[in-house]
Amino acid sequence: MADMCSIMITGRLTADSEIKYAGQTPILKFSVAVGRYDKGQTTSSFFDVVQFSRAAEGLTGKLTRGKPVVVRGEMRQEFWSANDGSKRSRWVLVADSFGVQPLGGGQEDRYERGEPTTQNMYSSLDDDGDDIPF
């Protein structure tokens, strides 16, 4: 079995999250913009995030555009064939836990410096992962 390498990102949701189902398995999808400073300019990277868990259902409607979040998970590459027959791929972050960054009570400073907080973390680590469709 290969070792998993977890990464953590901190950013803001680019749109409201969406929940879909693959059979009985809820799949929560959202995108996170992560800003960084490079040579005096702010640039952003965008990460597509998915989470497969029953906990995702309770978060529907709570993960809205602009909300600051911290996400931990594993990067996975998806492959498919386009309509023209060409091979395509993209990277997605499969979240094993994430949290809504609370802004207020001094948290703004920690968020702006890129220091994640562990408050309000949601985890799907107790899922067995057998329902993941790839």
Image (cartoon, grey):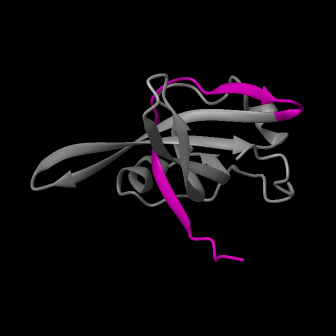
* Quarter of the view holding residue 100: top right
Residue extending furthest toward the right:
24
Q: Position of residue 101 (x, y in %)?
A: 55, 45
Q: Nearer the viewer, residue 69 or 31?
A: 31
Q: Nearer the viewer, residue 23 or 88?
A: 88
Q: Position of residue 51 (x, y in %)?
A: 69, 43
Quarter of the image containing the N terminus?
bottom right
Task: Say above or below: 111 vs 12.
Answer: below
Residue extending furthest toward the front:
85
- Left or right, 59 with respect to 25, comes to left
Q: Position of residue 57 (x, y in %)?
A: 80, 31
Q: Is residue 103 visible?
A: no
Residue extending furthest toward the left:
39
For the magenta stretch, what is the residue range?
Answer: 1-25
Name the residue rendered at 47%, 30% in the picture.
Answer: 85
Figure label count: 0
* Quarter of the view holding residue 43: top left
Q: Position of residue 115 (x, y in %)?
A: 44, 61
Q: Is residue 7 visible?
A: yes
Is residue 113 rendered magenta in the image?
no
- Left or right, 37 with respect to 24, comes to left
Task: Say above or below: 134 vs 86.
Answer: below
* Quarter of the view holding residue 97: bottom right
Is residue 17 rendered magenta in the image?
yes
- Left or right, 42 with respect to 13, comes to left
Name the residue rendered at 57%, 25% in the picture.
Answer: 64
Q: Nearer the viewer, residue 54 or 87?
A: 87
- Left or right, 62 with respect to 53, comes to left
Name the residue rendered at 57%, 33% in the picture.
Answer: 30
Task: Say above or below: 51 vs 127.
Answer: above
Q: Nearer the viewer, residue 48 or 109?
A: 48
